[in-house]
Image (tube, grey):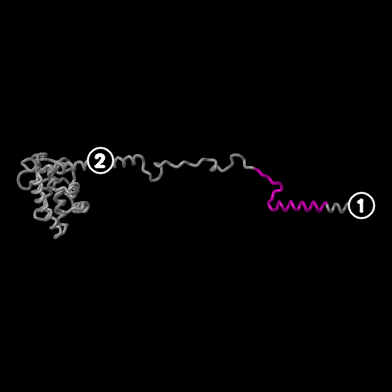
Amino acid sequence: MRKLTMVSIAAMLVVALATAGTAGAADSADQGQGKPAVASQSKAPAGSQDKSQSQPPAEPSAPSEQAGSPSPTAQASVAAQAQGDAEAKVDAHKTLERIKERGAKVSSTTRAKAESKMEAVVTKTNENAAVNGSAAIATRLAAEFGMTADQLNAERDAHGCSWGDLMIAHSLDANTSTDVTAAQLVQLHKEGTGWGQIAAGLGLKLGHVVSAVQAEGRVAAGLAKPDGKVAAIGSDGTRAGVGAAASAAVPAGGASATAQTGVGVGVKIKP
């Protein structure tokens, strides 16, 4: 009986030990696989989140601060320049309109006669350029008007005018104190205003204008040597003394006119 009891107790011990070993092995296996024995759900401490998520997004730079954007000073300068250009165009338009109106008051017959003679010079000058080429004419007229041949060629190409018309425009421009340019006179003529009306509108005597244009035509043709003095043109009273035994000066920045009786009278073009 005692032997049987001892055997039963031994068996129970074996079973208990086996059970304990199985549980221990299972725990070891779980720990070997990286599994915690007790699951924990720890939270990150407050304030440890990514700062980039807690901070507000940076505001975009103002346009003036962005790369390549003009500064307020530069923008103001551009605006002022644009306004100045616009005002200059308006003033030039008003001046040209006054020239047209004043020229129209001169007798149409007188204007027509002067224009016919000037157009004859224009035709001869253009024919000469067609036969002998533009290089020689450009060189002669450039020396007469105080320019280079390249400058005169560029001006002619830019305005799309003939050599004869460009020659007249510079001749008139050199003899007037009116605030206009040869380019503006060329444009006015291209718009349909005759050279006689333009010259009269500038306050120039048409008889003198014809003589001056004919003289410059001889320079263009090589029949007279350029001397840097555009043939002088008398005024209708606005600039009394030009073309007579007196002298008159155009304001600085333009041509200075010194006219005397005799040969070699002309308007000296300032460099």
Residue occupying the far bottom of the picture? 131
Q: Is residue 81 above or below residue 124?
A: above
Residue occupying the far front of the picture? 108
Badge 1 crowding class, 10 Å Cα cut-off, few under 14, some 14 to 19, many 20 or more, is few
Q: Is residue 32 magenta?
A: yes
Q: Residue at x 30, y 40 (%)?
A: 80
Name the dominant secondary structure of the magenta segment: helix
Q: Is residue 75 left or right of residue 259?
A: right
* Viewer-nearest residue: 104 or 221: 104
* Viewer-nearest residue: 260 or 158: 158
Looking at the rendered structure, the kind of residue marked 2 is: Glu
Looking at the rendered structure, the kind of residue marked 1 is: Thr
State the image coordinates of residue 73 (x, y, percent, origin top left).
34, 39
Q: Residue at x 25, y 40 (%)?
A: 87
Q: Mark 2 or mark 1: which is in front?
A: 2
Residue occupying the far right of the picture? 1
SS label for mark 2: helix
Q: Total label count? A: 2
Badge 2 crowding class, 10 Å Cα cut-off, few under 14, some 14 to 19, many 20 or more, is few
Q: Is residue 207 magenta?
A: no
SS label for mark 1: helix
State the image coordinates of residue 228 (x, y, percent, origin top left).
13, 49
Residue 157 quadrant: bottom left
Q: Which residues are magenta?
A: 16-42
Q: Say whether disc 2 or disc 1 marks the residue closer to the N-terminus.
A: 1
Write down the residue under mark 2.
87
| Disc 2 from disc 1: Cα separation | 128 Å
- Residue 70 - label: none
Q: Is residue 148 left or right of residue 215?
A: right
Q: Given contact means CB atoms under 8 Å apart, are the residues at marks 2 and 1 in contact?
A: no
Write down the residue under mark 1.
5
